[in-house]
Image (spheres, rainbow, N blue to C red):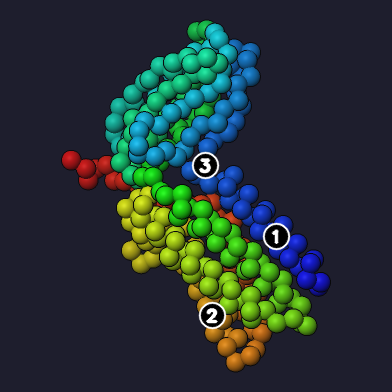
Amino acid sequence: MKKAVLWSLAVVITLGSAVYQRTTGPTYPLRGKAVVAGTAVKFKLPRNAETIGPAEVALTAPAPLTGYLDYKRFKTEDAWTRIVLVREGDRLVGRLPKQPATGKLAYTVSLTGGYVATPVTGDGPIILRFKDPVPIGLIIPHAIIMFVGMLFSTAAGLTALDKTKDPRRLVLWTVSLLFVGGFILGPLVQKFAFGIAWAGFPGGIDLTDNKTLVAFLFWVAALIAGRKGKPARPFVLAASLVTLLVYLIPHSVLGSELDYSKMQ
């Protein structure tokens, strides 16, 4: 396989997995469309907010549509609280009260053009998680290094398929990038956002931390297997496939979550 073809294919696979992860993650905005009183309403509703203030929930909805949100703290026996949406130009806006970091609110949005309200969010509520602000100087390097790590992982796997090429240099790059992105910058980002640097094994079930650990261990095994000059192709292929699979798991699944029952 020619070098240009290999890297082009690696870029396509990496971008595809990144887009899939971004569009399926539980903290990315929920997008959709609903018809209310004969009017089509597109929406982009938040599932992630910062603790610096209330979380804004807004929809572009022309007059005379009106609406409201119902919310309560997630996984509690709280009664639902209703907030009437306020019209601001062509938008209907509501603001949910801020919560501590890792705190979550369940909320629904309903619109009406007359006597019948339409729940635009469907049958179940949207879950909104709060986090503390994270310096942009950490977020950007973390995102870039994890993306490049995935790119080198894919390239190493494709190189291992070609018996005329040696993937060991790419394996070393992949291990280094995953270590820096997943075990140095990643915990720093999480510490700023949620107050805890590591929430995976052995002390937690955070799937983002655990999948990073699994992928890294597979790459360490591939690195060790090739330490005596052997290409260790089966190990490299296995590590590359495992990394691709774990990257397809949506970001922040089983993430840190505040237990309101333990709060005063």
**Does residue 87 sit above or below 19 in this rendering?**
above
Residue at 76% x, 78% y is 162
**Quarter of the image containing the N terminus?**
bottom right
**SS assignment at label 2:** helix
* Residue 169 found in image quarter: bottom right
Q: CA distance from mark 2 to mark 3?
A: 33 Å
Residue 250 pos. (x, y %):
54, 51
Residue 11, label in figure: 1
Tell me if mark 3 has few (under 14), some (14-19) or many (20+) residues whose alpha carbon lies within 10 angstroms of its own. some
Residue that sits furthest to the bottom in the current view: 228
Instruction: Name the amino acid, label 1.
Output: Val
**SS assignment at label 3:** loop
Residue 221, label in figure: 2
**Does residue 163 sit above or below 250 in this rendering?**
below
Q: CA distance from mark 1 to mark 3?
A: 23 Å
Nearer the observer, 31 or 133: 133
Residue at 58% x, 65% y is 149
Instruction: Name the amino acid, label 3.
Output: Tyr
Tell me if mark 1 has few (under 14), some (14-19) or many (20+) residues whose alpha carbon lies within 10 angstroms of its own. some
Q: Nearer the viewer, mark 1 or mark 3?
A: 1
Tell me if mark 2 has few (under 14), some (14-19) or many (20+) residues whose alpha carbon lies within 10 angstroms of its own. some
Left or right, 263 with reference to 172: left
Residue 16 pos. (x, y %):
67, 53
Nearer the observer, 224 or 71: 224
Residue at 33% x, 63% y is 203
**Does residue 221 sit above or below 132 in this rendering?**
below
Residue that sits furthest to the left in the current view: 264
Residue 28, label in figure: 3
Mark 1 and mark 3 lie on one chain; the one further toward the N terminus is 1
Instruction: Name the amino acid, label 2.
Output: Ala
